[in-house]
Image (cartoon, rainbow, N blue to C red):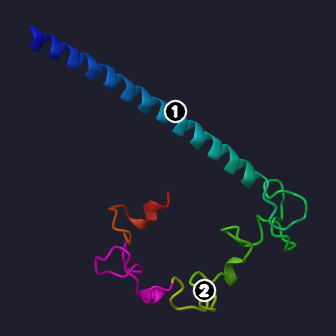
Amino acid sequence: VQWYQRRVHGELQLNFISRHIANFIMKSYLIFLILVLIVGIVSSAYWADVDSDGDGLTDVIDDDDDNDGFLDTEDGDDDGDGIADQDEDLDFDGLTNAEDDDDDGDGIPDGEEDDDGDGVINDDDPDDDGDGIPDEDDEL
């Protein structure tokens, strides 16, 4: 009878501890979700207030956020970094991408790259990322 009582008491104590651990995990998860929400709100508020050119208009409402005299829709700056596409230098070697034979700096000339490693250079490969979808359909 004593063994049975101890066993029952031990299981009850284990259930009590398990319940507290589960409660702690749920509270921790709730705190985590609240923190993620706060970080999301703060970061979106920050980006909404960015004024890249310092003209007093946030980029969200500024039609020329780099203040180069050209509307953002017309200035040829696809990535919005304030550098015109023709002047970009992705590998920071001092040559613009248009002048650079290896604009990503990987040591392989741009016309000879083989992204999926199938032995066919990207220019000749109908599926250069190797995902089984032809490149012409990848962009749809």
Magenta stretch, overall SS = loop
In this view, 21 is above or below 131 = above
Q: Secondary structure at mark 2?
A: loop
Distance between mark 2 and mark 1 Cα atoms:
44 Å
Q: Which residue is mark 2?
A: 92
SS of the residue under disc 1: helix
With respect to residue 78, does 26 lie above or below?
A: above
Vertical side of 81 occupied by 124: above or below: below
Nearer-N-terminus badge (2/1): 1
**Nearer to me, 122 or 42:** 42
Taking the magenta stretch, the answer to whether it contains residue 32 is no
**Which residue carries the number 1 mark?**
30
Frontmost residue, 36 versus 108: 36
Is 12 on the left-hand or right-hand side of 28? Answer: left
Q: State the image coordinates of residue 45 (x, y, percent, origin top left).
A: 74, 48
Residue located 43% across and 30% down the image = 24
Q: Residue at x 77, y 72 (%)?
A: 75
Mark 2 Cα shell of 10 Å, populated few (<14), some (14-19), many (≥20): few
Q: Position of residue 94 (x, y in %)?
A: 64, 92
Residue segment shown in magenta: 105-126
Determine the residue positioned at 60% across, 86% down. Answer: 92
Q: Position of residue 1 (x, y in %)?
A: 9, 7
Farthest residue, direction right: 56
- Which mark is on residue 16? none
Q: Amino acid at mark 1?
A: Leu
**Residue 119 falls within the magenta-colored stretch:** yes
Disc number lying in front (2 or 1): 1
Quadrant in the picture for residue 132 = bottom left
